[in-house]
Amino acid sequence: MPSPGTKRIAILGFDLEANRFAPVCGRPEFEERAYYEGEAISRDARADHPAIHGGICGFYATMDAAGGWTPVPILFTGSTPNGPVDQGFFDEVMDRMRAGLAAAAPLDGVYICEHGAAVSTGSHDPDGDLFAMVRETVGPDVPVIATLDLHTNVSQRMVDATDLLIAYRTNPHVDQFERGAEAAAAMREMFDGMRPTAAFVRLPLVAPSVTLLTAEGQPYGDLIRLGQSRIDADVLNVSITAGFAFSDTPKNGMGILVTTRGDAAKAGALADTLASAGWADRERYRTNMIGLDAAVRLAVETGADAGRPSLLFADVADNPGGGGRGNTTYILKALHAAGAEGVLLGVVTDPPLVEAAFAAGEGKAIDARFNSAETQTFSEPFTAPATVAGLSDGEFVGRHGMVADRTVRLGRSCRLDLGGIQVVVISARQQCLSADFFAHFGLDVAAARGVVVKSRGHFRAGFQHLFPPARIHEVDVPGLTSPNLANFDWRHLPRPVYPLDPDTVWPLAGR
Ligand SMILES: [Zn+2]
């Protein structure tokens, strides 16, 4: 066979997990987190400690190793999970991407690094809009492959506009790099003539995120593993997307997506088999939270007797990784009132409080006023005397979990000593992904009696060396990402849907 010439592959992506109940976001929120155009994408993807999305890094690494390609980096932008994106900003991003693709023609391929659970102020399916724009711009014959978060809400439009969709298979998401690498490998197969065929089935199953871990013994992990056991010479990829409930769209629901190397019948049959298995197992998607009183009691008892093993408490209802503002004070207030000792809590997003700490200076006593400038529901004020125990620009390279070897940017940040509780306060809203988020401020997580993290589940990968699952408690407090789905005013979810509607039937008669 003749050796292929250099392949010109466009790189782009829009990364937003949108919580319908959180405030609208736009350019400032995307620029704070990730906004890369042109060569800046290639530079960061190839850096020793990248900050750009791991999927892009994996795609570059695989293509670089194989050689014979020229990246055509266009635009990648992403926000920390947020509310719906402003349509005007999204349209600007789309215009720049369209212009970039058109200017780069002819292209041999397009890699899209997408989250897949975006919502805009004008559309339930901006990801589908973007994929359709790409297909329209490059034409029907250019391979278009996208990687997706497993919390994506897949639409038929997304499937139809692309050749292959590849979702993560781990939660916490520690396989972003590998999925980008898989996209690159599949694109190389397509350059050699392989043509993928996909089958997509959506289940009326919208489970709370805390029930969607992929460890052994978890229903979602079991279903993903069942899908992977069916990979063979014909089956190119099985992606099972749990979706993101809080997007509240008509396309919500667990997605079963099977892509074969051109065998439509086999893709359809396997998708049906996996969908039936997932549906039969739906009752296992149950939350297992403890109340605030119980959590405080456990934290105080642990403090009273250092012989008890330390505990980790997850504030799953205020997860910035799901659109939470990272600033609710329910747990902090209760622990403070109870006189808990030896507790680390973080990371709290409160730029005015950080600035007050900087203004006072390290070692100084302040009245720490949490949420002094906040008007969001759940973001209630709380004031306590504190000492400014540390100030930082908030930039470091992580060691554990999803931030291992990656650059983390918290913005200007501080450590506040509230007596028994040490609080890490940051400016650039994000979830607490690992013990590094405390270690950077001189705090020893291994020596703490209790640790409170604002995160739904990704923290698990970054604390597993210190906290086995049995010593982790998810706390049931109010918030924008509460696993109690019945607390929310759903407007757009397809109904009936399980478990909100326990008697949901699937498949419908006559299917
Ligand atoms: Zn996710």
Image (cartoon, rainbow, N blue to C red):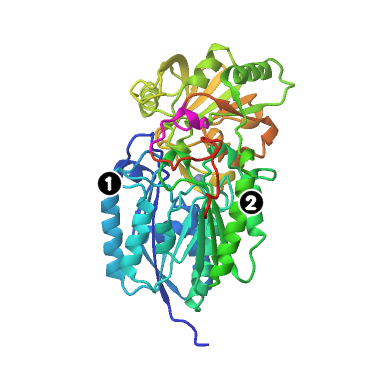
Nearer to the camera, 433 or 281: 281
Query: Which of the marked residues, 2 or 1, is nearer the chain's N terminus?
Result: 1
Q: Is mark 1 within 8 Å of ligand 1?
A: no
Residue position marked by numbered label 2 in the rendering: 277
**Image quarter of residue 142:** bottom left
The magenta segment is 479-491
- Circle 2 packing at 10 Å, graded few (<14), some (14-19), many (20+), is some
Q: CA distance from mark 2 to mark 1?
A: 38 Å
Find residue 82 and report its horizontal and vertical position in percent. Answer: 39, 39
The answer to whether 236 is drawn above or below residue 366 in the figure is below
Find residue 268 and report its horizontal and vertical position in percent. Answer: 55, 63
Amino acid type assigned to the residue bearing label 2 in the image: Ala
**Direction from residue 36 to residue 46 in the image, left or right:** right
Nearer to the camera, 393 or 52: 52
* Mark number, residue 286: none
Find residue 331 and report its horizontal and vertical position in percent. Answer: 52, 21
The answer to whether 196 is drawn above or below residue 299 in the figure is below
Q: Is residue 47 visible?
A: no
Nearer to the camera, 498 or 488: 498
Residue at image point 67% right, 16% down? 301
Residue position marked by numbered label 1 in the rendering: 87
Find residue 297 and report its horizontal and vertical position in percent. Answer: 63, 16
